[in-house]
Image (tube, rainbow, N blue to C red):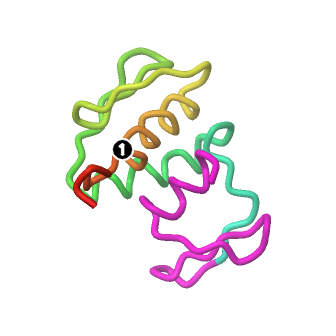
Amino acid sequence: MNQVEVIARRILGWKLNRWDRWYDPEKEVFINEFNPEQNLEHAMLIVEKLKQFGFIYKVNGDTDVCFNDACASGTTHAEAITNAAFLIAENPSVPDEWL
């Protein structure tokens, strides 16, 4: 899975409907061509969802953001949001050595 897929599935709770379309079962809508790294509107969907989970969103300049202690940067604001969200989504909750 790439970075966008991980975020869509683990943070947003979406399901892949087609190779270019996601389905949001919570809102019962389809999302075409989800690209939060380049589309600030898409990136802000991630911000809103993480806020619902209790994360505090902080902006440090145009290209640095934090969700609690998960901070990242990017060439754009949208990319920074995506990178920080990926740090959260990719963080394994159970260490592999426990399995």
> Where 8 sits versus 95, above or below?
below
- The reply, left or right, for residue 12 in relation to residue 49 is right
| Amino acid type, residue under disc 1 in the picture | Ile
Residue 91 is covered by the magenta coloring: no
The vertical placement of 4 against 61, above or below, is below
- The residue that mark 1 highlights is 88
Taking the image as shown, residue 23 lies to the left or right of residue 50, namely right
Instruction: Name the residue located 35 percent from the left edge and 26 percent from the top edge.
Output: 71
What SS does tag 1 mark? helix
Tell me which segment is drawn in magenta: 1-29
Residue 44 locus on image (x, y percent): 49, 47
- Say left or right for 96 vs 9: left
Residue 13 vs residue 44, the one in the foreground:
13
Q: Residue drawn 23% across and 35% down?
A: 68
Q: Is residue 86 above or below residue 20?
A: above
The answer to which of 25 and 62 lies nearer the viewer is: 25
User: Which quarter shows the N terminus?
Assistant: bottom right
Quarter of the image for residue 39 reads: top right
